[in-house]
Image: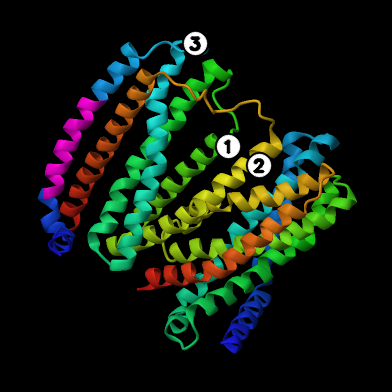
Amino acid sequence: MSATVKWFWFASPQTFFPLAGTIARWCAIAAALLAAAGLYVGFFVAPTDAQQGEAYRIIFIHVPAAWMSMFLYVVMAFWAAIGLAFNTRLSGMMASGIAPTGALFTFIALWTGALWGRPTWGAYWVWDARLTSELILLFLYLGFMALQAAIDDPRRADRAGALLAIVGAVNVPIIYYSVQWWNTLHQGASVSLTRAPSMASAMLAGMVLMALAFWLYSIAAALARVRCIILERE
Amino acid sequence: MIAAARCIVVRDLLLALRRRSDVATALLFFVIVASLFPLGVGAEPNLLRAVAPGVIWVAALLSTMLSLGRLFAADHADGTLEQMLLGAAPLGVVVAAKSFAHWLAAGLPLVAIAPVIALQYDLPASLYGVLALSLLLGTPVLSLIGAIGAALTLGLRGGGVLLSLLVLPLYVPVLIIGAGSVDMAAAGLAPAGQLQLLAAMLVVAAAFAPWAIAAALRISTE
């Protein structure tokens, strides 16, 4: 029962503010260390790919960023739903704190994907199902942020954004499958993102390290942003 | 409840009839956008036939967008919307009726005029039925999803542009399946599967969108 009490204790922005500061600091330090380790493994330990040569090494940024971009949307929609259900102020702040980081990772995934696609496929952009749905995900993030920016009253901004995030979250699987279906109709399997299932363990280790680093960075950045929002509003 | 819904549909249609130019503008926009594409991409018949379903569907999306801003704005301005929020009829039913009226005034004319555009694009006559049917099933989904965006952006500055930013990404599945069904039929395959998917989207949107629209209206007017 005490755990429950504690959760609600930290649901108040005033009590959450110092906790967020501590967590953000430690997460930022851990993210920096893990990113350094991950980049070291990625650049110096992981072997050169047999087919793609050195170009594949962008995978250590690209894949974790793509994972985070999708995961953060789910987290954002989760906080949005909590905020609508329990009418807590902090949940809306969390959602608006996460959105820019999610949009950033979506953009990084698209950008590194373009840089990776040029040497391997010979094109910066192909209308692949995953690329297209990632692009639409970026539009969803930008729509969420634009809606919140257009509303002056922070409570209304939180609640309107929350509803949009939930509608978007319901739509994301439908968008993904429709884009995939569209892709198979319009374009043969000329380009496939599925890699060979066997991956050197050093590559996997580098990717997991980078994913953890991005995860901790997201927590740190989101909480730092929430602290700014708390200072601004309270 | 049904009486309230019927009352709102009749009222909104009457309002649309009194301001015919609004309805005509959106329809004209649809025709103009569709007519601009051949000027841009060239009048090669094979090319036009290939792009016709997509162009007509994109034009339908944009035209629906254009009329969405008016869905709640006038009622919000003169206080009718507040009466609807306070009234005895469930808000979900009220907004479902308003979305239906919006579709009757904005979506149905598109369905009727689409074959004329298809004629311009030299689409085979056998595809007119599929095109009209896909628009008939798809445009109500556009009205329902768009109404969520219209309710969220009610009374905001720059509402129109913001509305398109919010709603157009959500329209993607309807566009893909709708234009895809015509492509499918053009390729000589049975479009039934795509039309059924479109019908499924309509059922899901009709079941859930009214609650989201009602919640959005409550947020926007509190």
Structural distance between the alpha carbons of marks 1 and 3: 26 Å
The quarter holding residue A183 reads: top right
Q: Quadrant of the C terminus of chain A?
A: bottom left
* Residue A22 is inside the magenta segment: yes
Q: Look at label 3 and name its amino acid.
A: Ala
Are discs 3 and 2 both within one chain?
A: yes
Q: Nearer the viewer, residue A140 or A149?
A: A140
Q: Which is more toward the observer, A40 or A98? A: A40
* Residue A192 point in image, percent of width and height: 59, 28
Q: Residue at label 1?
A: A129
Q: How far from the left and from the top, in percent, is residue B202?
A: 63, 63
Snapshot quadrant of residue A8: bottom left
Element under disc 1? helix
Chain letter of disc 1 in the image: A
Mark 2 in CB contact with mark 1 (< 8 angstroms)? yes
A230 horizontally vs B206: left or right: left
Q: Which residues are magenta?
A: A19-34
SS type, badge 2: helix
The tag on residue A50 is 3
Q: Residue at x 82, y 45 (%)?
A: B189
Q: Quadrant of the N terminus of chain A?
A: bottom left
Q: Nearer the viewer, mark 3 or mark 2?
A: 3
**Residue at figure coordinates x 37%, y 26% from the top left:** A61
